[in-house]
């Protein structure tokens, strides 16, 4: 894995940064206040080829990988305007369809996901399952008369369902040989009968809303199934590893934005004889925050390289570590930034207060830090399970 980025990657980073700063934190704050998605930024990012940078060239994408897509999300975040749906639409759904979808699904979805004209959401979490994906109760059964699929179940904390053209739903089907349930993925168009949504009232400042979904015998054609019915976890983790990597990019970008605001303030704010940034009590915590963010970025880049190289097992470990490290670094950076600004850190002018809640999300979703520690202790260190 290269330690330094290529000239092409540095150029991509600079170009995306310029786009992000064109819009900035104030733009994203305004969209939240108006209760609408960041349509203008999404459309311009798509037009420049950034949304589909990880998707195959033959289907309208840039032919890159999750590494390139993580650069896009990180730099938008560092400019104060991250696009959360990038984690879901091109990273999870686009990757799964590109790797496992039928030719018809690829033609139907990938060019539109790449050019931003269509968006896809992702539904896996359930009220009674949480982090335990083995307890998912959304089930899919075949109608023997028509060959259609019938989906029944509930999902919670699904981002952007109201603006998504379809949702990639994780359900479970029965294995004919063993009778056990196995995970499968289905594309459910937004207006499918029986597919209902309810907005969850969140104390979270984000353009993307959260929803609870109800699927009541949702009838889908056979072609709604993504990939092989027997592939199970392989297809699921093809989407979950990019999700963790992109969540790390989201968190690192957010942390960088908060740190930059704090550093700028600490350089200029003078209380006694010198700027407050000259005092080690202010300077050292900001330096530590920078170090933590840079270390998290290295692990994120390692995870992205492994994933793009086809090493799903290695990428799984690295993606979990990257998400953990990035979330911790982000929370600390935001907290220290607010603390550096004092009362100003809670004003609308500096745009940091809303990040206090947003930074916590990176610790919780898409998987909690405790479950990541479970993964590392069991899978990496070989320690026994308590459950």
Image (tube, rainbow, N blue to C red):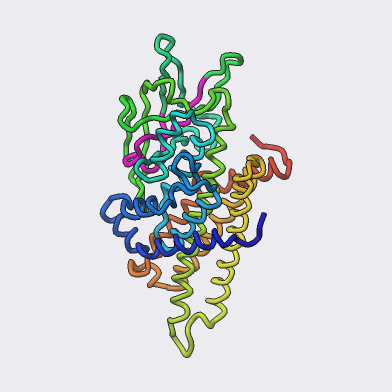
Q: Is residue 345 above or below residue 31?
A: below
**In terms of secondary structure, what is the magenta stretch mainly?**
strand
Residue 101 x/y as whole percent: 49, 31
Say if residue 374 shows up in the picture. Answer: no
Residue sitting at x 57%, y 79%: 280
Spot occupied by residue 173 in the image (x, y as percentages of width and height): 51, 21
Quarter-wise, where is residue 149 in the image?
Answer: top left
Q: Residue furthest right?
A: 382
Span shown in magenta = 154-173
Position of the C terminus by quadrant: top right
Residue sitting farthest toward the bottom:
273
Q: Nearer the viewer, residue 28 or 372?
A: 28
Residue visible at 48% across and 48% down?
A: 62
Q: Is residue 160 magenta?
A: yes
The residue positioned 28% from the left and 50% from the top of the image is: 36
Q: Position of residue 203 (x, y in %)?
A: 36, 51
């Amino acid at each position: 894995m290269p330690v330094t980025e290529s000239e092409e990657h540095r150029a991509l980073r600079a170009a995306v940064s310029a786009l992000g700063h064109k819009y900035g934190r104030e733009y994203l704050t305004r969209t939240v206040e108006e209760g609408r998605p960041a349509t203008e930024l999404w459309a311009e990012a798509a037009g420049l080829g950034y949304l589909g940078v990880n998707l195959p060239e033959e289907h309208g994408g840039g032919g890159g990988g999750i590494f390139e897509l993580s650069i896009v999300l990180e730099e938008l975040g560092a400019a104060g305007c991250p696009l959360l749906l990038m984690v879901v639409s091109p990273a999870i759904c686009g990757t799964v369809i590109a790797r496992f979808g039928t030719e018809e699904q690829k033609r139907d979805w990938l060019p539109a996901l790449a050019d931003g004209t269509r968006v896809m959401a992702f539904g896996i979490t359930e009220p009674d399952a949480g982090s335990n994906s083995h307890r998912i109760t959304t089930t899919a059964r075949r109608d023997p008369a028509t060959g259609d699929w019938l989906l029944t179940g509930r999902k919670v904390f699904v981002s952007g369902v109201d603006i998504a053209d379809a949702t990639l739903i994780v359900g479970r089907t029965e294995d004919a040989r063993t009778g056990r349930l196995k995970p499968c993925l289905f594309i459910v168009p937004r207006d499918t009968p029986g597919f209902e949504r309810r907005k969850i009232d969140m104390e979270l400042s984000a353009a993307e809303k959260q929803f609870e979904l109800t699927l009541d015998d949702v009838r889908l054609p056979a072609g709604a199934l993504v990939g092989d019915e027997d592939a199970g976890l392989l297809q699921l983790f093809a989407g979950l590893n990019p999700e963790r990597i992109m969540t790390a990019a989201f968190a690192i970008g957010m942390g960088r934005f908060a740190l930059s605001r704090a550093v700028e303030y600490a350089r200029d704010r003078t209380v006694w004889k010198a700027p407050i940034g000259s005092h080690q009590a202010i300077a050292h915590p900001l330096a530590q925050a920078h170090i933590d963010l840079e270390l998290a970025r290295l692990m994120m880049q390692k995870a992205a390289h492994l994933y793009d190289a086809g090493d799903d097992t290695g990428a799984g470990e690295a993606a979990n570590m990257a998400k953990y490290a990035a979330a911790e670094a982000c929370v600390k950076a935001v907290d220290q930034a607010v603390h550096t600004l004092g009362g100003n850190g809670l004003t609308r002018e500096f745009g940091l207060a809303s990040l206090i809640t947003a930074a916590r999300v990176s610790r919780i979703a898409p998987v909690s830090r405790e479950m990541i520690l479970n993964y590392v202790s069991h899978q990496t260190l070989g320690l026994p399970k308590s459950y």
